[in-house]
Image (cartoon, helix red, strand yellow):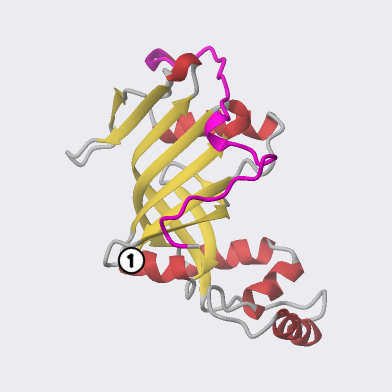
Amino acid sequence: MGQDEPVQKDRQELDPAAMRKHYVSEGLAETELAASPMDQFDHWFREAATGGLYEPNAMVVSSADPEGRPSSRTVLLKGYDGRGFVFFTNYGSRKGIELDANPAVCLIFPWLTLARQVIVTGTAQRTGRDETAAYFRSRPHGSQLGAWASAQSTVVPSREALDRSYAELAARYPEGTQVPVPPHWGGYRVFPEAVEFWQGRENRLHDRLRYTRLTDGGEGWRIDRLSP
């Protein structure tokens, strides 16, 4: 099939253009927002976590290489506070290499069941090794071994090779023994510069309220309503 040839649709194939979800919501008003985006995120995150969503801490992390070519993947949020959002990864992975070379990053929390999204733009910075070690120690034993067994984003010869690497590590560090923290693995904290809270509304007239950090060096935020 040529690059520009249309896809031949089977009669039973679903048509994505016909898929529509009519959002019904009370909406989001400026007067309801917290003073800071992290406080507002905490409020929405708690509602997502208690609203039956599967892995509400799942977020899309988008990075770009120095030439501006983007890449995205889903990872799990592992912490947040007044400074920003934290996740952990292999520093030798594609996202790790890109974030070290170009720290500009975008996060998206797609809480579709609630007709909500949170979109964060900012910069990523490695967490300290003490913070990384503390989180690594909290991981299940198998996940600790997995951080060593997988050279994330690199080509692996086969599934068998990956399983063999894991088995060798499991024999070296059986359950109950301490697994050392990999030097190539750790956290990133995303410091937000702008955070948008998106609430689906009827007739595609969604509420989009965006916090933007003030540029005067202060801790304040400007709030703008964006056209849907």
Q: Classify 59 as above or below 125.
A: above
Q: Is residue 31 above or below residue 100?
A: above
- Name the residue carrying label 1: 65
| Image coords of residue 111 (percent x, y) | 57, 35
Q: Is residue 26 left or right of residue 38?
A: right
- Say which residue appears at 43% left-offset and 30% top-offset: 197
Q: Classify residue 15 by image quadrant.
A: top right
Total number of numbered discs in the rendering: 1
Residue 22 placement (x, y as % from top left): 56, 19
Instruction: Tell me if mark 1 has few (under 14), some (14-19) or many (20+) residues whose alpha carbon lies within 10 angstroms of its own.
Output: some
The C terminus lies in quadrant:
top left
- Residue type at numbered disc 1: Asp
Q: Is residue 136 above or below residue 197?
A: below
Q: Which residues are magenta?
A: 2-31
The verdict on residue 26 being magenta is: yes
Q: Which residue occupies 69% across, 63% down?
A: 139
Whether 14 is drawn above or below 225: the answer is below
Relative image position of residue 61 (x, y in whole percent): 47, 53
Q: Taken as a whole, is the magenta stretch helix, strand or loop?
A: loop
Front-most of residues 140 and 4 = 4
